[in-house]
Image (tube, rainbow, N blue to C red):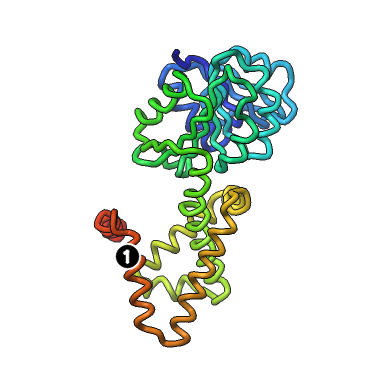
Amino acid sequence: MNIEKVLILGLNGGFGKLFSNLLAEEGLSIFGIDLAPQPDKLAKCARYLCGDLSQPDKNMLAIARQVDCLLICLPESVAFVALEHFIPAMSADALIVDTLSVKTTLAEKVTNIREDLQLLSINPMFAPDLGFRDNNVVTVQLSSGLRSDNFISLMEKWGAHVTSMTASEHDRQTAITQVATHAAIISFGICLTELGYDPNKALPISTPVHRTLLALFARITNQAPEIYWRIQVDNPYAAQAREAMSASLKQLADMAYANHQQEFYNALTRSKETLSPCLEELIAYASRIFQI
């Protein structure tokens, strides 16, 4: 059961454009819907409709009936409203794919709504400008089938490392890999401002570690802030991750204030043991970063 026609909701967004180009290269027919009057010049599609996806008209729903894959590249607030309209319009055995960053809420909303549809929830763990090659994608198969398997095979063909999880496993792990990670980098950036950071004075004496962390923060500030805000507030385990981050910083501060040197050494040893399964690989990766 092949995928031949794909309707992308949110065609002009980063992942909408990325998928439109890659799927078009595979010979698929691409249709797109977005708010802008015209498709983005970097997007590929055979037919484009301009409109509000929270209130789709009959023309939008007519296209949904013709395709065998609906690809949702929308913010959660719009995606859930759009799904209410588009799910009933899809033909039997069609595939619905979303790119939402939180999966448990989605699973609760769509599971068992229509048992004749295939539902594949994916989370590309990278910004769309980086592309799939050598980057990670999480898949949550809410209702599997041949078309969902084919879509996963396409991402692997494009060079992605695909890992399958349940919705709950996904949200728990991304609370660490996204929420905690971004919280640490953003907090570092906020701290710089509070300390009166002057790049002209600091960069000439900066370390490779400082420049790396600074570059990560700069990349975040150059993206749409909505992306990082939604990661911090939507994940059901986000508060737990930030609380652990805050407690860890306080623990470090307490060690320094009390001059507990051995306790500091012990904490680093325990953390090193946590990383032991991939420690050498990570050290080599850090060396490559610093050699750029």
From the image, tell me which residue sits under label 1: 272
Q: Residues within 10 Å of mark 1 (few under 14, many from 20)?
A: few
Place of residue 171 in the rendered image (x, y in percent of width and height, measured from the top left) = 53, 46
Residue at figure coordinates x 33%, y 59% from the top left: 275
| 266 with respect to 250 (left or right) | left
| 8 with respect to 85 (left or right) | left
The image quadrant of residue 161 is top left
Place of residue 43 in the rendered image (x, y in percent of width and height, measured from the top left) = 52, 28
Is 292 or 60 nearer to us in this picture? 60
Place of residue 282 in the rendered image (x, y in percent of width and height, measured from the top left) = 30, 56
Residue at figure coordinates x 37%, y 36% from the top left: 160
Is 82 or 19 nearer to us in this picture? 82
Question: Is 263 drawn above or below residue 167 in the view shown?
Answer: below
Residue at figure coordinates x 53%, y 38% from the top left: 14
Give the amino acid at mark 1: Lys
Q: Quadrant of the C terminus?
A: bottom left
Place of residue 149 in the rendered image (x, y in percent of width and height, measured from the top left) = 42, 23
Question: Is 285 drawn above or below residue 200 in the view shown?
Answer: above
Q: Secondary structure at mark 1?
A: helix
